Image: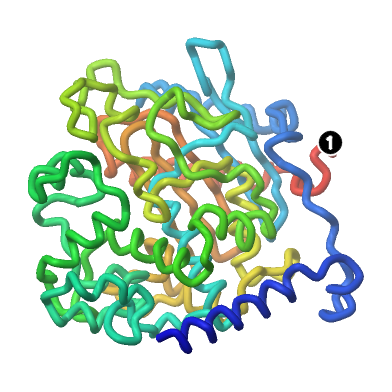
Amino acid sequence: MRLREALIAAVFLTALGVFLLKGKDRDMMTGYAPAPEPVELNEVLTNSLSELPELKGMDAVIDSFMHAWSIKGISLSVMRNDSLLYARGYGWADKEKGQPMTPGTTLRMASVSKLITAVGIMKMQDEGLLNIQSPVFGPFGILNEYDRYIRDEQYYEITVEHLLRHQGGFTTDGGDPMFSTPAIMRRYSLTKAPDSATLVRKLVSEPLAFEPGTDQKYSNFGYLLLSLIIEKISGMSYEDYMQAYVLNPAGCYGFHIANNYLSGRHPGETHYYMQPDSEPAREYNGSGRSVVRCYGGNDIHALSGAGAWVGSTPELARLVAVIDKDPALEDILDPLSVEQMTTRLDDDTYPLGWVDCTTEGEWTRTGSFSGTSAIVKHFPDGECWILITNTSTWRGSLFSKNTSELVRSLRPRFSSLLPKRNLFYSPSNT
């Protein structure tokens, strides 16, 4: 195993050295002319750039939608063929402080985070650091340090791809372990909320619900394991690796892993809201205290790559732009990796990172938990709509259907009215 780890380290350092070549040196190696440097979108985009008379009708529809669902704030960005056409905040980022939602406001995006994690895994595959057919556990597994806790030998069949497709054999029939920390603490006699390593040690001692690859059950825990795989191979924290090798190269500079409480929100991050009649929740760490559910009801930070990213909708559009095979912006993934991520195998198999990809070429990623709901819709004509809210609704995760319907209603009415421009590079061009 020491030899294998040394080989992995050598490959990683080689890839790192190539990446760190800058400017003319890298251009000479690739043969490409340097692309314009992306602007820091969260710093320069303003609502006024997208407050256009021809889109008053769209503003009215969104305002009506917010009123109907008692939503405090919405961020919306629209991209077409790798050009950002529209980016605007609606309502409030922090109503109590009088802070409006803006394009640069960052928001929790819940399970849209899984798309980001999948991009990180595919990036590592492109660089030769792993293969998605690699085993996760077992003698040659990436996370074999947990083998000593495994009793069910079916764990040794789990591959990276199984985790990406929610086919690892995990189930939430007894509750999602990522959203039931007090129950986990009671079950395993823990005196404090488990960190990732402790949670994995405890959970892999349990039998799998099904043989890996024979069924699929949506699994946040599977994407936590993918986050740990990224950490193990890179030798960096998940957040640091993703920022350095995926997000920043994509022009996404404001992405961070969420914290659990209002006091820990990042600069520029929205306030999150529950509905007025929402019941308080017990604090996730077993303290017994009552908290607002979106601030301490769950250990959001511990979700890591399963659901903890915070970012703005324009920067999320930047990420989609570099994984979509559109030549206008050079992708950060090999075209074959993008193809792997977006190919629909059948009705019963999740795509890689996305939650649905149709045979016609429409890609969807949704996410929701207390205080937020997010949707990314990339259409076959190259248009991409991204919408994130900062308020829970009584429908919970089912609210994703309502946001999807909103996007579908707006597109035929207002797509042709969107200005032909690219806010990725020229935010002052109105």
Callout 1: SS = loop
Q: Residue furthest front?
A: 2
Q: From the viewer's perspective, is 403 left or right of 37?
A: left
The kind of residue on which mark 1 rests is: Ser
Q: Please state the horizontal and vertical placement of residue 387, each as a whole percent of the image.
A: 50, 41
Q: From the viewer's perspective, is 291 left or right of 127?
A: left
Residue at left offset 18%, top offset 70%: 149
Q: Is residue 46 visible?
A: yes
Above or below, 173 relative to 380: above
Q: In which quarter of the image is residue 86?
A: top right
Q: In which quarter of the image is residue 306?
A: bottom left
Residue at left offset 88%, top offset 66%: 23
Q: Please state the horizontal and vertical placement of residue 358, each as a whole percent of the image.
A: 42, 69
Q: Is residue 61 visible?
A: no
Q: From the viewer's perspective, is 244 left or right of 65?
A: right
Instruction: Tell me the crowding category of disc 1: few under 14, some 14 to 19, or many 20 or more residues within 10 angstroms, Cα based.
Output: few
Above or below, 273 relative to 400: above
Residue at left offset 48%, top offset 78%: 340
Residue at left offset 65%, top offset 38%: 87
Q: From the viewer's perspective, is 339 left or right of 283?
A: right
Above or below, 324 relative to 30: above
Where does label 1 land, which residue? 428
Q: Please state the horizontal and vertical placement of residue 384, each as a whole percent of the image.
A: 57, 54
